Amino acid sequence: MHTTLNPRRGPHEPATTTPPRRPGSVRRTTTHDSLRPDGLTGRLLVVARGRDLRTEVDGSTSVVDAVRLDIEVDYLSGRTITSITADPDFDGIDRLIGVRAASGFRGRLGEVLPGEREAGTLRHQLLDDLPTAVLVSGNSLHAELDMPRDPERMRTGVDQCAGWARGASIMVGWSDEGATPRVTGPLAPPLVLDGDPSAWHELLVLGPHDMRRARRMDVWAEDDGVHVDAFFRDSHVLADGDDTVLHEYGVAAVIDPTSRTFTSCAATVGVLPWQECPMALASAGRLVGAPVDGLRAWVRTSFTGTSTCTHLNDTLRALEDVPSLVDSL
């Protein structure tokens, strides 16, 4: 890797493997691969794939659900979706064409897929994660082309999260140099698990400038409740082919199946871009006592400001799907 690490970088301790699947568990894995086949300023292709895999007590496996979405986005013109296909197909998918994969997308999603958020479907999770996956894909442009940030966006973004806090590395770099500092992450250890080809769904081979948002969520039951082990990583393949990590979190939680509330929740950090970002870790503890039902909406409206992180918030929001995964056990 030829990138000089930023002295104000955050933690650089990425996960080196994927934990083994537990007997009597279900694992949801998703990836959003952001590709630019026509060059950095061309169209953005997002290949979103996911799988729910049940592991029986005897170690055998069965696929509960599998979904693939191929989405073309005009990134430089408002991040507008210009085409989308799904496997398996579903009625109404064409209603997302012309919609911006940005603010307001999730509200439109509720109209296109009524009831699927409440049902915790894999397809809904893939689409729910699309706006932030597209947003983060812009890192390849900023890293390689030195594209300037919108000054108005920088001014209005102050204090929106720990990394964008007033006086933090991003804001200091922009005010002093007129541009946000480059994110420099460590090399990304592979997520595939030696000896277990079922640890993840089939992963695409990425090339230079491609980016990936990957999630894993293991769910199983014990005497004290439903346990969750969640993992999240954003990675970026540099021009020289080195795959590097931008963001990486882990979340461990326990949910009482009777009250459907969290009895514990804690986040750990693997990789974060700036030294201020880990200040958001403690926010995961706010879920203790909160209901899992309606979690996406509650986190979205309540987890704001410099004690939170956009990417950790999305990881916490995805825990709303735990009851549906339990039902598949």
Image (cartoon, rainbow, N blue to C red):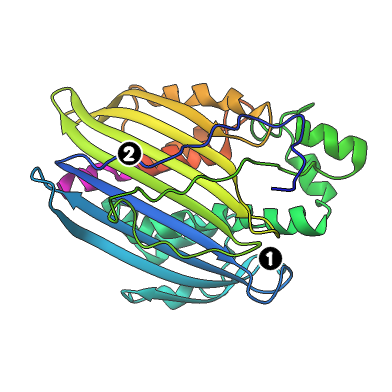
Residue 263 or residue 270, whichever sits in front: 270
Tag 1 secondary structure: loop
Local secondary structure at mark 2: loop
Marks 2/1: CA–CA distance: 39 Å
Amino acid at the residue labelled 1: Gly
Q: Is residue 327 magenta?
A: yes
Occupied quadrant, residue 123: bottom left
Residue 74 lies, in percent from the top left, at 65, 72
Q: Crowdedness of circle 2 by 10 Å Cα count: few (<14), some, many (20+)?
A: few
The residue singled out by tag 2 in the image is 19
Which residue is depicted at the point 33% across and 76% down?
A: 89
Which stretch did the figure color magenta?
A: 320-329
Q: Is residue 133 left or right of residue 90?
A: right
User: Residue lying furthest left in this view?
Assistant: 58
Q: Which mark is residue 78?
A: 1
* Residue 134 visible to an observer of this rendering: yes
- In the figure, 197 relative to 193: above or below? below
Residue 97 percent coordinates (x, y):
52, 75
Instruction: Identify the mark nearer the N-term, 2 or 1.
Output: 2
Instruction: Identify which residue is drawn at 47% across, 72% down.
Output: 70
Q: Amino acid at mark 2?
A: Pro
Residue at left offset 35%, top offset 52%: 29
Q: Residue at x 55, y 46 (%)?
A: 188
Mark 2 vs mark 1: in front: 2
Numbered mark located on residue 56 in the image: none
Is 322 placed left or right of 279 in the picture? left
**Residue 311 placed where, x, y %?**
54, 41
The reply, left or right, for residue 102 in relation to residue 290 is right
Location of residue 246 in the rendering, given as x and y in whole percent from the top left corner: 61, 43
Main SS, magenta region, reads helix
